[in-house]
């Protein structure tokens, strides 16, 4: 079955969006995008190279002076119109997301709304770029500050949220008065290009938003975006390994950076928790997008007094899952993005099994459905020597670790080199404060498994990177503070 768009012109094949126009790659090269559920072709997208991307950077640079000089209110209105376009076309955006990413259509609708919410949020932040008036220590001087746009930004986003990872960067960048070149992921270019079409319809001026696509040339485009002197800021969401590479590449041009990198979220359930709520929270946190979100629970620690009961209830919930094609309304979980992801999940499961973990449900690939499917899996009796304890699985595998004391579990939780999200369930108020403060992560969910909200700062510590997206802090990533001193007053 080929999915249908209400507005077929939103599927932009073989063209990227540069300087307000739709352009093929100069080389004429394209790459294929396949539906991860069926393996069938979704379409082909341009294989941009550094030459093509240079043109996009030049367009963003040319558009900057006029765009940055608009008032915050004018930019807010543009973002609001983009929000309205996203909302009016949310069904098609959701269809594109499921088509190229595979997630269930209900999740894709949720992502389309979440993605649009960043336009709404930052349309409200755009007019409020306040500076300070600072009492000088030098007699006769007056000091004040302005928040100015950092300049042209290079944005690099992953495939797991084909719309939201882009809007979470583009919306604050535009609110601040920056112009952007966004390198969309090779796996999911069509959602990104549909967003560009909606930007066009919303009247975003030519050159302000440029979206380029590539598969093979991804690294060379990354190199260009990080070394170009025209680009003053790079914001990247993806793996820690690529984030470190981009940071090294950015050193010579001393760019401002935001890096939203990998996680390995601990999810702790204390004896005093509401058990059913904790099971529901862990299910939501672990299995959303089949475990392919950076804030997914990766290590589930359950205190020994309730361990067996938790394992039973958690496994029962997973029994109710149905895996299949994202467009089938009866399914709860879709495919993984590609077969490499399936191999990694399989390795983690086999490793845990070999080291004494016991699978209570799942544990196998699903070749009858296609090459990208893996059963939702629960493994009990996990130990710290297993790969899942230290590596992000990025798939539908829940490893359940028993623990005895609060001190012990906080230590284990903090052993990871990354620190993005952490979760725990407890009804003891003192413990809630203690553990929330003790976890070495950028975001803590207490008695909830879902923490994403455009109003909340999103970002990590340690090898999960730095910078915050969303919230009133999100816009600061795209601003620089200019200090103005008036002398002889
Ligand atoms: P990845 O780092 O391989 O790729 C992410 C994006 O970067 C893709 O668009 C890819 O095309 C691009 N890329 C890869 N190499 C590049 C290079 N040398 N130069 C420029 N761009 C390059 O990650 P992935 O495996 O596709 O995505 C999953 C990872 O992303 C996980 O580790 C996950 O935790 C992380 N992630 C983090 C967040 C967050 O907000 N912290 C959100 C989503 C995903």
Image (cartoon, rainbow, N blue to C red):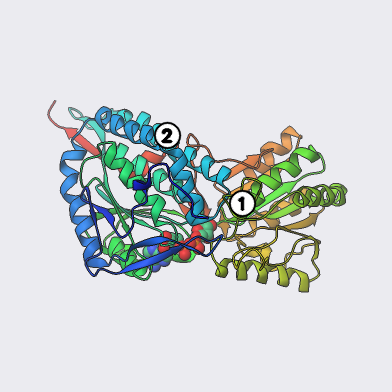
Residue 390 visible in the shown view = yes
Residue name at image x 37 percent, y 32 percent: 84
Closer-to-camera residue (368/358): 368
Q: Give me the residue at 37% from left, 29% from top.
A: 124
Q: Secondary structure at mark 1?
A: loop
Q: Position of residue 299 (x, y in %)?
A: 69, 56
Residue 273 visible within the image: no
> In what element is the residue under mark 2?
helix
The CA span between labels 1 and 2 is: 27 Å
Residue at disc 2, CB closer than 8 Å to ligand 1? no
| Image x and y of residue 483, in percent | 23, 38
Outermost residue to the bottom: 354
Q: Which mark is residue 87?
A: 2
Q: Is residue 210 left or right of residue 392?
A: left
Mark 2 surroundings: few (<14), some (14-19) or many (≥20) residues within 10 A: some
Discs 1, 2 touching: Cβ within 8 Å: no
* Location of residue 423 (image quadrant): top right
Query: Is 436 situated above or below 61?
Result: above
Callout 1: 10 Å neighbours few (<14), some, many (20+)?
A: many
Q: Which residue is mark 1?
A: 296
């Amino acid at each position: 079955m080929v999915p249908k768009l209400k507005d077929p012109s939103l599927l932009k094949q073989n063209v990227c969006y540069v300087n307000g126009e739709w352009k093929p790659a100069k080389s004429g090269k394209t790459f294929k995008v396949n539906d991860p559920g069926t393996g069938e072709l979704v379409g082909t997208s341009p294989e941009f190279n550094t030459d093509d991307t240079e043109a996009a950077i030049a367009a963003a640079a040319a558009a900057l002076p006029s765009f940055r000089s608009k008032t915050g209110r004018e930019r807010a209105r543009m973002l609001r119109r983009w929000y309205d376009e996203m909302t009016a076309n949310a069904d098609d955006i959701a269809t594109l997301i499921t088509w190229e990413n595979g997630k269930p259509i209900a999740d894709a609708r949720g992502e389309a709304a979440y993605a649009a919410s960043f336009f709404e949020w930052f349309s409200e932040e755009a007019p409020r770029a306040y500076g300070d008036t600072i009492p000088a220590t030098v007699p006769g001087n007056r000091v004040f500050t302005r928040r100015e746009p950092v300049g042209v930004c290079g944005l690099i986003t992953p495939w797991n949220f084909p719309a939201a990872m882009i809007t979470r960067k583009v919306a604050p960048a535009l609110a601040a008065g920056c112009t952007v070149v966004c390198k969309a992921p090779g796996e999911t270019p069509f959602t990104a290009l549909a967003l560009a079409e909606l930007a066009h319809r919303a009247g975003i001026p030519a050159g302000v938003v440029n979206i380029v696509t590539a598969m093979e040339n991804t690294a060379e485009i990354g190199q260009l975006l990080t070394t170009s002197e025209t680009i003053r800021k790079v914001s990247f969401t993806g793996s820690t390994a690529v984030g470190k590479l981009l940071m090294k590449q950015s050193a010579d041009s001393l760019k401002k950076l935001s890096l939203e990198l990998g996680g390995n979220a601990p999810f702790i359930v204390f004896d005093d928790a509401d058990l059913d709520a904790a099971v529901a929270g862990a299910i939501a946190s672990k299995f959303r997008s089949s475990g392919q979100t950076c804030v997914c629970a990766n290590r589930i620690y359950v205190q020994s007094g309730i361990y067996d009961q938790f394992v039973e209830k958690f496994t029962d919930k997973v029994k109710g899952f149905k895996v299949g094609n994202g467009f089938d309304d009866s399914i709860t979980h879709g495919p993984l993005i590609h077969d490499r992801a399936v191999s990694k999940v399989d390795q983690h499961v086999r490793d845990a099994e070999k080291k004494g973990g016991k699978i209570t449900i799942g544990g196998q690939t699903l070749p009858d459905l296609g090459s990208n499917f893996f059963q939702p899996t629960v493994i009990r009796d996990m130990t710290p020597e297993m790969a899942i304890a230290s590596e992000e699985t990025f798939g539908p595998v829940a490893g359940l670790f028993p623990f005895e004391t609060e001190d012990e579990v906080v230590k284990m939780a903090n052993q990871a080199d990354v620190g993005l999200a952490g979760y725990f369930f407890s009804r003891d108020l003192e413990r809630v404060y203690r553990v929330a403060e003790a976890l070495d992560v950028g975001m803590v969910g207490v008695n909830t498994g879902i923490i994403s909200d455009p109003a909340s700062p999103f970002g990590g510590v340690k090898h999960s990177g730095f910078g915050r997206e969303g919230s009133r802090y999100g816009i600061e990533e795209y601003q620089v503070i200019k200090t103005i001193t008036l002398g002889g007053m």
